[in-house]
Image (cartoon, rainbow, N blue to C red):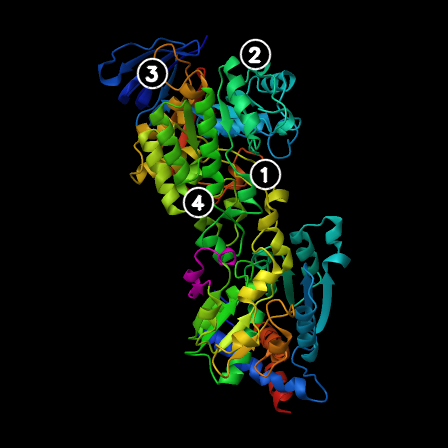
Amino acid sequence: MRLKRKDLLGIAELERDELELLLSTAESFKEVSEREIKKVPTLRGRTIINLFYEASTRTRTSFEIAAKRMSADCINISVSTSSVVKGETLRDTAKNLEAMRPDCIVVRHSCSGTPAMLSRYLACPVVNAGDGAHEHPSQALLDMLTVKERLGGIDGIKISIIGDITHSRVARSNIYGFTKMGAEVTVAGPPTMLPPGIEKLGCRATTSMEDAIRGADVLMMLRIQSERQAEPLFPSVREYSRLYGLDEARLRAAKKDVLILHPGPINRGVEISPEVADGPYSLILDQVTNGVAVRMAIFYLLLGGAKEGLQEGVKA
Amino acid sequence: MNRLVIKGGRVVDPAQNLDGLYNVYVMSGRVASIKKAEADTSEVGSGVDIIDATGLTVIPGLIDAHAHLREPGYEYKEDIRTGTLAAAAGGFTAVMCMANTKPVNDNESITRYILNRAEGAMSRVYPVGAVSMGLKGERLTEMAELKAAGCVAFSDDGVPVANSGLMRRALEYSKVANLPVISHAEEHELVGAGVMNEGDVSTRLGLKGIPNAAEDTMVARDLSLAELTGGRLHIAHVSTRGAVELIRNAKARGVRVTAEATPHHLALTDEAVEGYDTNAKMNPPLRSKEDVDALRAGVKDGTIDCIATDHAPHSSMEKDIEFDKASNGIIGLETAFSVIYGLVENGVFTLSEAVRAMSTNPAKAFGIEGGRLSVGSPANMAIVDLGRSWTVDPRQLNSKSKNSPWLGRVLLGVVVKTVLAGNIVYSRA
């Protein structure tokens, strides 16, 4: 089975059955990471390039581990070590990499739309690992997988995404993903961090933290970047934290068994208090674990590993 | 001494309220007479060239109040020869070229250089001098000297005159030259790192937005300064409904202001950015449907005097890159007529309104010869086939740069011939 498309550029263009396929495939791959020998031969002989134009530890490592657990050869290129500093255009870099016949290029870039642009130049599949404030599809998939595991499904649940929605690709991908899967999505943040027309993506928007917390099954806290103070989108980290930070006092207004997600890296004491981040409702580390399985599923469904590879690998 | 007659075409000249079948007689580069075709029994003598315009439409040569010909300094994008070729192919017989060349057209020697390079070109070139030295917004240029050298207006186009005090003095001082100051109205702090219109589409694409207020506030400031000084103001590339309303009100108060809109702001919305097409990236950005509707109404009621291309050639090095990093602007000279004729065909404008905004009014606003086909006017005209369409093929464009959002599109309305001072400077097979 494969996806109906060459690339994974965003959640916006995916159908619900494609999302379900990605999630169920990821579920079946989870077990590989629990083995003593964490490797299946599915993508043996395939080459995957991680092309990262923006700093990342978690996402890049997760893609790399996913590739390696499927026996693919994985190469990491990050901006500081590549010829990008010599003034080569993105197109030239991509065409040169393609000339070495990779089977997939995973790209992260601070400019929205860059993976879409690359996908037009390249014959091999392109996976968006986060582009500007546009989309971060693998993050949304791992978030959906994490919620699905805990709640048994996504249909009908209520999720609130809280923080700087304007600059968040995680928010956009999750709004698309959760609404397509039948959830009710609310986004919340100060008015300066709610972009115009965000409701047209299918969610409800509010500036009230209380409103966002009340009745939600899942709270997703977004990292707040203190540089945004300079723009100025908020007056101080202190005031932001008082109005939109999640601590135990705030949590009392939430549903009893509310789940807490955060795409990381977290700012302890800013958008989330240490007690909540490390508390019983926090699924932050489950998200990271699921990230590997989701990325294995993405590679598998885009590259179409040999059928017996999966059978052997998963059943053995 | 050339002699030419254009026979049997539908002549549309809003300056004379003309729309009918006429024969246009040209002698020594000027219109010698214009006669109703059905009543014209004159014999055409030998040595007279005849253009049979039966089934075609003859309009005064188009005048572009806003183009970047890139010479001197950026000849890899465009030069005066290719830019005027593109103009002729688009039916333009006059082009005003902006001052943001390298070096900047902020002194008479650069103006003279441009005019020298434009000698024998396929269209007339009218340089626009800078408002401030080096476009830095600090010191005024020598406006009287620039005018003497051939400038027809002053503008720091590409960047706004951020300093309100300097803009006030520019509008005041330009009165010595009796030429308009063209405002690129944009409030920098509101633009910030924006790369497209702020709205639903920018939110969806995750691109930084530029609110309408970035233009509205600056237009309001410049109208207020024009009112204070009595100077002549022209607002370049109006893109917002707010700006249209501000200009309409100012005109009603008697402020000496004219304005222009581009074919792309009249024809496209910010939806064109979908797919991160850098040929839909320009400044000001493509706006919403409400803005487009207001611009169209502005052209119809005369609030927007001119349709100008803002022809902005860029090479693939500046366009075939990340959207955030790509340069602003598109080429427009070769598609302007067809794009606007498409709007005529859809009932947005009459042909007469379109020609008024693309020829009559720019001639009036900037004191440029032409813009009409009356006896004694220069024999500058475009002969167009309104029933024929063409495909915008990058290989067939005359401009050095190919940054057009209409590449591959089929457009109705073909410029078949362009006549400059009685000479055929462009002819389409």
- Is residue A14 at least partly visible in the picture? no
In the picture, the disc for residue B24 is 3
Secondary structure under tag 1 reads loop
Q: Tell me, for residue B148, which label it has, or none.
A: 2
| Tag 1 subunit | B
Give the number of the mark in front: 2 or 1: 2
- Gap between marks 4 and 1 measured at Cα: 21 Å
Circles 3 and 2: CB atoms closer than 8 Å? no
Instruction: Calculate the distance from the C-alpha at mark 2 to the C-alpha at mark 4.
Output: 38 Å
Mark drawn on residue B314: 1
Of tags 3 and 2, which is closer to the observer? 2
Q: Amino acid at mark 4?
A: Arg
Counting from the top left corner in percent of width and height, residue A302 is at 57, 72
Q: Quadrant of residue B13?
A: top left
- The residue labelled by disc 4 is B287
SS class, disc 4: loop
Q: Can you say whether B49 is above or below B412 in the image?
A: above
Could you tell me how far apart the alpha carbons at marks 2 and 1 are, in whole angstroms?
A: 31 Å
Type of the residue with mark 2? Ala
- Amino acid identity at mark 3: Val
Q: Is residue B276 magenta?
A: no
